[in-house]
Amino acid sequence: MKLPLLRRDLLVAARRPGEWLIPLAFFTATVAIFPLAIGTRPETLRTIAPGVIWTVALLSSLLSQDMLFRRDIRDGSLEQLLLSPRPLILAVLAKAVAHWLACGLPLIVLAPLLAAWMQLPAEQLLLLLVTLPLGTAVFSLLAVFAEAVAAGASRSRFLGGMLALPLCMPAVIFAAAAVAGDAPAAPLLLLAACLSLAITVLPLAAAGALRASAQGI
């Protein structure tokens, strides 16, 4: 993995906190509003909490993916990456890790507070904390892939999010089912399989998409 690129992306995220604070604020506010909107009955909140938290986590991830390659396109960094003799797949992986550290990890840290607000029992909270690293990692890998596909379409700002949304749905379904269901083993294994497939396929596919779209950048 290209550690200088990872360090650079994390420094940029630290200098521009709005790029990850806005999705985090959206995640917090949207989840927090549900008990106020539908009432505070524990049975109702426990039933909807897994689906609500995971759906809002997905939408928060989509909010944060727009700038993955757009800044690199503007300052010429992406062209340098494409011309570099080093494998482009390492740069793609660095992008995915930086996106997860800046956007996925804060959601995981904040999730226990929101789970308590949604009256989620302790055993379901534990499952939520197991599924969140897996699912958010899938989101980050899919975000990099989708933005790589959309890199050549500079006028289509939301194309990457539109591409990533349906691809993320299996991870959301399996993760929410693992947290909400009485038999979490099977959904957890399916979620882990999604992550394994994403790690194996998406960095290579994203690197290929970046090279294919280079002429349109």
Image: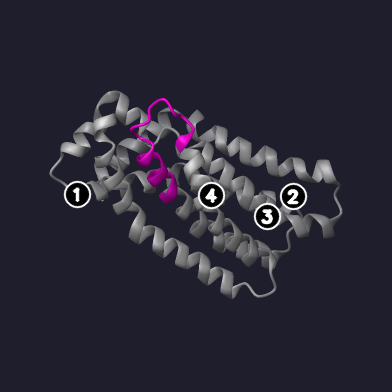
Looking at the image, residue 28 sits to the left or right of residue 162; the answer is right
SS for dot 4: helix
Q: Quadrant of residue 25?
A: top right
Q: Residue at x 15, y 40 (%)?
A: 84
Q: CA distance from mark 4 to mark 1?
A: 29 Å
Q: Is residue 39 above or below residue 197?
A: above
Q: Which of pointers 1 and 3 lies earlier in the amino acid sequence?
A: 3
Magenta stretch bounds: 141-159
The residue under label 3 is which amino acid type? Gly
> Comparing marks 1 and 2, which lies closer to the viewer?
1
**Residue receiving disc 3:** 51
Looking at the image, residue 161 sits to the left or right of residue 210; the answer is right
Q: Which of pointers 1 and 2 lies earlier in the amino acid sequence?
A: 1
SS for dot 1: loop
Looking at the image, residue 136 sits to the left or right of residue 213; the answer is right
**Residue receiving disc 2:** 117
> Comparing marks 3 and 2, which lies closer to the viewer?
3
**Residue receiving disc 1:** 87
Q: Residues within 10 Å of mark 3 (few under 14, many from 20)?
A: some
**Residue receiving disc 4:** 166
Q: Is residue 148 magenta?
A: yes
SS for dot 2: helix
Q: Residue at x 68, y 57 (%)?
A: 50
Q: Which of pointers 3 and 2 lies earlier in the amino acid sequence?
A: 3
The residue under label 4 is which amino acid type? Pro
Q: Position of residue 173 (x, y in %)?
A: 60, 59
Q: Is residue 45 above or below residue 182?
A: above
Q: Which of pointers 4 and 2 lies earlier in the amino acid sequence?
A: 2
> Comparing marks 4 and 2, which lies closer to the viewer?
4
- 122, 58: nearer the viewer: 58
Q: Is residue 205 above or below residue 65?
A: below
